[in-house]
Image: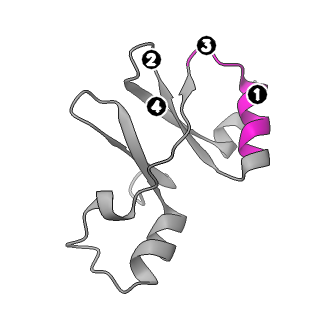
């Protein structure tokens, strides 16, 4: 995350479909607060499994509103087959033109 200055990592299955997300907040709450070893703890143990996904055809204002109302900062974007295309952050949406 720090190398790319991203605040989240999307965890995908063998078909590249999102199955979870790990955010900086997850690292703090689920890893460090429980004194788990970051070198040996699988992402599956700390990821958020109930994630929302956007589709390339979705309207940006809808996601900006939903992210604000539901208080999450990252959303994976998938194609028609459900495969991960990208991850968008609130900052990405704010700078959207």
Boundaries of the magenta span:
56-68
| Residue at 44%, 50% in the rendered image | 49
The answer to whether marks 3 and 4 mark residues whose Cβ atoms lie closer than 8 Å is no
The image quadrant that residue 57 belongs to is: top right
Q: Residue under label 3, please give it.
A: 57
Secondary structure under tag 4 reads: strand
Residues marked 2 and 3 touching at CB (< 8 Å):
no
For mark 1, give the secondary structure.
Answer: helix
Residue 96: image tag? none
The numbered disc on residue 79 is 2
Between marks 2 and 4 in the image, the one whose residue lies nearer the viewer: 2
SS assignment at label 3? loop
| 52 or 94: nearer the viewer | 52
> Magenta segment: does it hold 97?
no
Give the labeled residue for mark 1: 62
Of pointers 2 and 1, the one earlier in the residue sequence = 1
């Amino acid at each position: 995350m720090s190398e790319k200055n991203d605040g989240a990592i999307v965890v995908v299955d063998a078909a590249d479909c999102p199955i979870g997300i790990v955010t900086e907040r997850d690292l703090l709450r689920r890893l460090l607060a429980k004194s788990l070893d970051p070198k040996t703890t699988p992402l599956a143990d700390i990821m958020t499994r109930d994630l929302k996904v956007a589709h390339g055809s979705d309207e940006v204002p809808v996601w900006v509103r939903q992210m604000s109302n539901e208080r999450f900062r990252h959303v994976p974007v998938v194609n028609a087959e459900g495969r991960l295309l990208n991850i968008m952050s609130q900052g990405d949406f704010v700078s959207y033109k």
